[in-house]
Image (cartoon, helix red, strand yellow):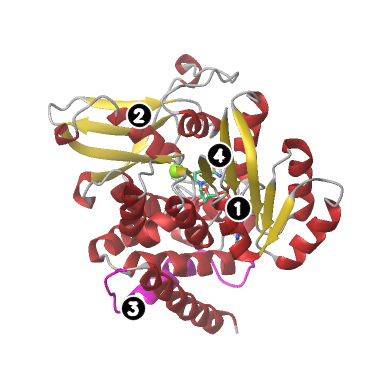
Amino acid sequence: MKNIVILGSTGSIGTNTLDIVDRFPEEFHVVGLTAGSNDEKLEAQIRKFRPAFAALANEAAAAKLRDRCADLPVKILAGNEGVAEVAQSQDAELVISAIVGGAGLLPTLAAIRAGKQIALANKEPMVMAGALMQAEAKKHHVRIFPIDSEHSAIFQSLEGHRREDVKRIILTASGGPLWGFSREQLQDVSPERALQHPNWKMGSKITIDSATLMNKGLEVIEARWLFDIPETQIEVLVHRESIIHSLVEYTDRSVIAQLGLPDMRTPISYAMRYPERMPLDLPSLDLTEISTLTFFKPDHARFPCLQLGYEALRIGGTMPATMNAANEVAVEAFLQSGIRFLDIPDIIRSTMEAHAPRPIDGLDDALDADHWARDKAESLVHALTR
Ligand code: NAD
Ligand code: MG
């Protein structure tokens, strides 16, 4: 029996994680659940999984949740501090990090510092402060197991091999909901259309990241820190069907890949139960049914965000945190219909160009860059929408 905490339990990764817990109640015990503001959904999860602790980042929602759960023996905390406190719950062994965006940095780092093993879906903290997260993980003897499907595939493809034999890793990208669109079509695309992902059902922020290819830019940086590999050895391949989840090429030109139908429960369960594999009752991959797998080079002209990710990684220091924050602001503005789709990369680039990068020596350096970039990107959004 493994005691777990889920950060972001009401989201897409969070609910998939609870689906696994539900299938294997003798394997996992939920100690804590946290979310942003959805008190109704969190209440239902508390009634079903009976954690000792829960938290909502939104204080008003947490007060409502307290009322809703007055008949239950659950301690409900509020605010970002409350979420971080649940992340450190004494009984927890494994923390599933599945908050969206930079908001996950503090609680995930708190869990690492408390010595919890981490199953990481929340990629933005790795982008903001990957070196710091890994240094803290090392210091506290914590392993960070990837949930992101590409990184789970790399992790699996590295197993049993010597790291010095790796030539490069190849992250696959679906290309997202708008692959093949012309610049004119991209200019006028609506949030509703951009949210229609062909292969994955995910939260709205990552779905827009997938449409701009910023998701792959973030994932290149995530891979840099998860696998301690330089960006010159990380490549991206567009693979529309999301069947090959990523590949590792070795020095003898042998290529090892991990395949499967696109279902996040496979990488989530692997991260939760490593090194064991869980018998998941899901459809098997039938390659004769799929019949054709297609591959393309990334289209940097129409989808410049991937290059911005590489650029931020090359510059280093506070630049990736700056890029991430500008992206969060721009995506939110696009979803609220304030700006156009192609304004997203423009806002990120302008924010990066205005930033004087500094080294990240501690958490405050990353948070300062994050705050600075949010202000800068918000002023750019304001100029476009007024
Ligand atoms: P989501 O929007 O569906 O869920 C986000 C969760 O975070 C919700 O529970 C929400 O309540 C919580 N949350 C939001 N803001 C918060 C805050 N300020 N404080 C505390 N909690 C907050 O997102 P998702 O699609 O599940 O993605 C979560 C993370 O996993 C993202 O970083 C994403 O990039 C990554 N990821 C997701 C998928 C996927 O299939 N959904 C795949 C790979 C990686
Ligand atoms: Mg991914």
Q: Nearer the viewer, mark 4 or mark 3?
A: 3
Rendering coords of residue 61 (x, y %):
76, 62
Pointer 4 or 1: first along the chain? 1
Residue found 50% across the figure and 26% down from its top: 261
Q: Which residue in the protein does label 2 denote?
A: 156
Instruction: Give SS at disc 1.
Output: helix
In the rendered image, the vertical position of residue 353 relative to residue 244, given as above or below = below
Between the residue at mark 4 and the residue at mark 1, the CA separation in whole angstroms equals 29 Å
Relative placement, left or right, of 237 versus 4 is left
Q: Quadrant of the C terminus?
A: bottom right
Residue 183 horizontal side relative to residue 23, left or right: left
- Residue 200 is labelled as 4
Q: Earlier in the sequence, mark 3 or mark 2?
A: 2
Disc ID at residue 355: 3
Number of the front mark, 1 or 3:
1
Q: Quadrant of residue 355?
A: bottom left
Q: CA distance from mark 4 to mark 3?
A: 34 Å
> Can you identify the residue that label 1 sits on?
86
Whether residue 304 is visible = no
The residue under label 1 is which amino acid type?
Answer: Val
Judge by depth and name the residue closer to the eye, 181 or 88.
Answer: 88
Q: Nearer the viewer, mark 1 or mark 2?
A: 1
Viewer-nearest of labels 4 and 1? 1
CB within 8 Å, label 1 to label 3: no
On whether ligand 1 comes within 8 Å of the CB at mark 4, the answer is yes
Residue 132 picture location, percent across and down: 33, 59
Mark positioned earlier in the residue sequence (1 or 2):
1
User: Dot 3, crowdedness within 10 Å: few (<14), some or many (≥20)?
Assistant: some
Label 4 amino acid? Trp
